[in-house]
């Protein structure tokens, strides 16, 4: 009889403390790593156990777009940069996001029923309110990962592969995408686990520092292991920088950072956030152990203050969006975010 084994979290460390009236109220623990893309990836700084694995979740979307782009989906179906940005997006149902997704689906002639996930409503508050007022029904196109899936479905159609089962690990599309992601991460089979993402696709778990390496390479594709893959990834990242609010949405941390031409950034579920700095040649990964994103802003601001890479305008936007002092619903000062790593 097998014994039940309790999963153990990787060793983490305090990163941010939320105070109220000068007293510590909440502690956000986690892990951070800073990696150079050069010499196969060099760990420059770390907090917590960054050799332990983490699922790459939605931070892997730009990597998962590489194979479909190498397969010619953009040229075959007339997809432009804003459509490429949606392949890497965690969209929230904004009108401009749904417009781009609809164009992608119609140009590739992909039936909405082909998506493996269930129908949903927009997650962006104003868009969801408008959706509800109009009496609309849930649709699969509103799913946060619809752009990534459209890229894969269009690629399957171009390659003559069945759309049915496209999300299964043994489908030719997923076998090739997983291999490409592992190549980009320089991750061997022994150190890669594959699970199921929230949208139904396979998702890799690798030592966390390799996720930072991935973003160092996205920022500096000259250091990537494959020139053709690097060119495809550069197309995706260029589109993300050109259309930052399509990638996530107004006020989202990744979208604020992507508006800066020196930065590539993306959020992932369960507390993971990643960014790459071009001029500084750095990749950074942050993972909050509680799976939240509440402390991302203070952490990223502190890291950019330490390593540079963001323009004065970007830093101003970040500090306005994520002030150190937070206020209650009556507008009075309630407490502060204190970075402690």
Image (cartoon, rainbow, N blue to C red):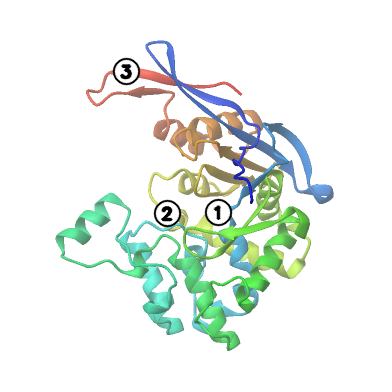
Give coordinates of residue 201: x percent, y percent. 53, 65
Q: Residue furthest right?
A: 39
SS for dot 2: helix
Pair 3/1: label in front: 1
Asked if one can make out residue 52 in the rendered structure from this viewpoint, the answer is yes
Return the residue nearer the eye: 329 or 139: 139
Q: Which residue is mark 1?
A: 57
Query: What is the spatial separation of the Cα atoms under label 1 and label 2, in whole angstroms?
Result: 20 Å
Q: Is 11 on the left or on the right of 147, as rendered?
A: right
Location of residue 125 with respect to 171 vertically, above or below: above
Q: Residues within 10 Å of mark 1 (few under 14, many from 20)?
A: many
SS for dot 3: strand
Q: Name the residue located 64 percent from the left edge and 78 percent from the top edge.
A: 172
Q: Is 55 on the left or on the right of 39, as rendered?
A: left
Q: Which residue is mark 2?
A: 245
Location of residue 165 with respect to 311 vertically, above or below: below
SS for dot 1: helix
Location of residue 172 with respect to 208 vertically, above or below: below
Give coordinates of residue 296: x percent, y percent. 50, 36
Q: Quadrant of the C terminus?
A: top right
Q: Which residue is mark 3?
A: 333
């Amino acid at each position: 009889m097998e014994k039940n084994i309790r999963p153990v979290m990787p060793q983490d460390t305090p990163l941010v403390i939320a105070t109220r009236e000068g007293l510590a109220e909440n502690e956000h623990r986690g892990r951070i790593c800073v990696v150079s893309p050069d010499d196969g990836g060099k760990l420059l700084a770390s907090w917590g156990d960054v050799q332990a694995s983490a699922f790459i979740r939605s931070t892997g979307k730009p990597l998962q777009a590489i194979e479909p782009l190498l397969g010619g989906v953009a040229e075959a179906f007339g997809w432009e940069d804003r459509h490429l940005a949606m392949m890497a997006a965690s969209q929230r149902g904004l009108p401009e996001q749904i417009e781009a997704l609809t164009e992608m689906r119609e140009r590739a002639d992909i039936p909405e029923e082909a998506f493996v996930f269930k129908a949903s409503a927009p997650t962006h508050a104003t868009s969801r309110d408008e959706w509800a007022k109009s009496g609309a029904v849930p649709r699969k196109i509103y799913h946060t990962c619809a752009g990534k899936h459209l890229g894969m479905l269009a690629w399957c159609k171009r390659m003559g592969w069945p759309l049915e089962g496209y999300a299964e690990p043994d489908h030719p599309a997923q076998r090739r995408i997983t291999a490409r992601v592992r190549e980009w991460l320089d991750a061997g089979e022994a150190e890669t686990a594959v699970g199921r993402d929230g949208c139904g696709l396979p998702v890799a778990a690798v030592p966390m520092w390799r996720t930072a390496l991935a973003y160092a390479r996205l920022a500096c594709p000259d250091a990537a292991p494959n020139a053709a893959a690097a060119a495809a990834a550069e197309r995706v990242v260029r589109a993300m920088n050109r259309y930052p609010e399509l990638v996530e949405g107004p006020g989202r941390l990744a979208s604020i950072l992507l508006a800066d031409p020196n930065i590539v950034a993306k959020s992932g579920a369960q507390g993971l956030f990643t960014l790459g700095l071009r001029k500084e040649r750095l990749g950074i990964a942050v993972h909050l152990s509680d799976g939240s994103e509440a402390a991302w802003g203070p952490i990223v601001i502190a890291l950019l203050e330490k390593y540079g890479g963001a323009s004065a305008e970007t830093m101003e936007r970040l500090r306005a969006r994520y002030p150190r002092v937070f206020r209650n619903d009556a507008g009075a000062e309630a407490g502060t975010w204190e970075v402690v790593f």
